[in-house]
């Protein structure tokens, strides 16, 4: 709320009125809805395009990395929720929204890996039993057999999300006192993990590293209302600076080609900087994007609403869909035909997974269970959209 008592954009999105009371139904922030939907689709697309030898396009990593934006939206929406509810209630609601889809996915993944381990003597099929407890308490990233990375490689997100949800009230408290400078806390944690891993060779769990890495964007989420008021040219200029630093980091300071790859993820620092650059560019285009959204409100609500009701399902089951499609398409000799078949099969298999398992997100959110999600009907709360996959 500004000095004149007029609610800020974040106040309106969180349901706060000029006298400090909360409205019964928070206003929708269509820009955050679209940003989140595009980001999760970008993550799924990236996983799909990194399946050598069928298809391998590492340069796609440089175009709009999705996870920084996912965590930024998560931080913004979580701040809205904390302005209306007690911290304990918010934590319970957030965990509940991911618990059921995660437990079902974990049960399926463990069944496949353990039965494979019992039937095979191959080292790659061996299940790491000493880390099995991570699946029950995923504050540390669950791991599995090397031959089944598609069943656990994406689960670092669950641990990072849980840590950030637990820390959200503290970060918001700090944000109210120092503003966006609160992002220094996760930034310092990220720098410390990099110092441990690169200088001293200490193995740090993936969930811990990514908690700090993407926690920077999560901590900036409550600043969304202020950032959206910046001039577009300032956001673009700042984004250009981050992009330049990211390229310098990836090719000079921490050369990714020394690791034999072109993947942006080979340098966590470069990924952080490039992600920040794209996020600022997206925010700079907020006004024209919102105008475009308004002109296409009905059709866009249907698409974005359906995606946002199934984001955690798309994220969890995207890699298994890639693996199934890749296995089936390998039977085709022609490389172009194999790539086309792989992409088509990925879409089909993922659609089947979404239909079969997406209803778990409805149950977790206490919505009416549906085989297919229903698009938004206009004016729904941004808080009802997940603040990240499955939230």
Image (cartoon, rainbow, N blue to C red):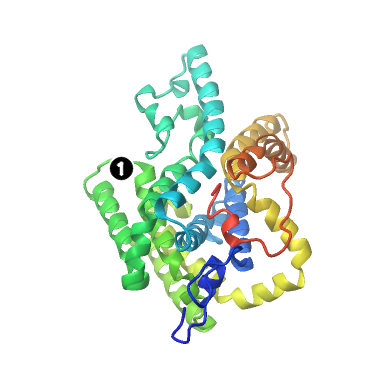
x and y percentages locating residue 205 in the rendered image: 34, 41
Residue at left offset 47%, top offset 18%: 122
Left or right of residue 332: residue 366: left
Badge 1 is on which residue? 204
Left or right of residue 178: residue 40: right
Question: For this rendering, which residue is in front, 41 or 385?
Answer: 385
Left or right of residue 384: residue 95: left
Residue at left offset 46%, top offset 55%: 264
x and y percentages locating residue 47 in the rendered image: 57, 45
Does residue 377 appear anywhere in the picture?
yes
Left or right of residue 262: residue 290: right
Outermost residue on the bottom side: it is: 4
Residue at left offset 76%, top offset 73%: 295
x and y percentages locating residue 284 in the rendered image: 55, 76
x and y percentages locating residue 94 in the rendered image: 49, 48
Question: For this rendering, which residue is in front, 216 or 197?
Answer: 216
SS for tag 1?
Answer: loop
């Amino acid at each position: 709320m500004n000095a004149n008592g007029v609610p800020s954009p974040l106040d309106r999105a969180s349901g706060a009125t000029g006298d400090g009371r909360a409205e019964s139904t928070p206003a929708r922030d269509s820009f955050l809805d679209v940003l989140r939907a595009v980001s999760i689709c970008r993550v799924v697309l990236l996983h799909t395009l990194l399946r050598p030898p069928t298809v391998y396009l590492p340069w796609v990593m440089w175009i709009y990395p999705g996870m920084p934006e996912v965590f930024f939206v998560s931080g913004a929406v979580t701040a809205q929720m904390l302005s209306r509810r007690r911290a304990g209630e918010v934590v319970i609601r957030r965990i509940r929204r991911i618990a059921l889809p995660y437990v079902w996915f974990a049960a399926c993944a463990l069944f496949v890996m353990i039965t494979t381990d019992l039937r095979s003597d191959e080292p790659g099929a061996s299940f790491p039993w000493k880390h099995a407890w991570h699946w029950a308490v995923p504050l540390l990233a669950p791991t599995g057999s090397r031959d089944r990375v598609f069943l656990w490689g994406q689960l670092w997100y669950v641990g990072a999300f849980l840590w950030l949800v637990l820390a959200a009230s503290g970060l918001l408290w700090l944000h109210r006192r120092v503003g966006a400078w609160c992002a220094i806390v996760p930034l310092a944690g990220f720098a410390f993990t990099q110092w441990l891993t690169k200088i001293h060779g200490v193995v740090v769990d993936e969930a811990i590293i990514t908690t700090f890495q993407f926690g920077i964007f999560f901590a900036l989420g409550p600043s969304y209302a202020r950032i959206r008021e910046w001039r577009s040219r300032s956001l673009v200029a700042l984004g250009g600076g981050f992009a330049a630093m990211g390229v310098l980091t990836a090719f000079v300071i921490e050369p990714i080609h020394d690791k034999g790859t072109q993947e942006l993820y080979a340098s966590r620092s470069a990924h952080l900087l490039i992600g920040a650059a794209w996020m600022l560019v997206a925010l700079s285009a907020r006004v024209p994007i919102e105008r475009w959204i308004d002109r296409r409100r009905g059709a866009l609500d249907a698409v974005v609403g359906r995606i946002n009701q199934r984001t955690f399902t798309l994220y969890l089951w995207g890699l298994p869909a890639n693996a199934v499609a890749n296995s089936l398409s390998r039977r085709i000799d022609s490389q172009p035909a194999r790539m086309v078949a792989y992409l088509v099969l990925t879409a089909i298999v993922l659609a089947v997974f979404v239909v079969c398992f997406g209803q778990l997100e409805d149950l977790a959110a206490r919505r009416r269970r549906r085989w297919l999600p229903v698009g938004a009907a206009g004016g729904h709360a941004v808080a009802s959209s997940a603040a990240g996959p499955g939230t």
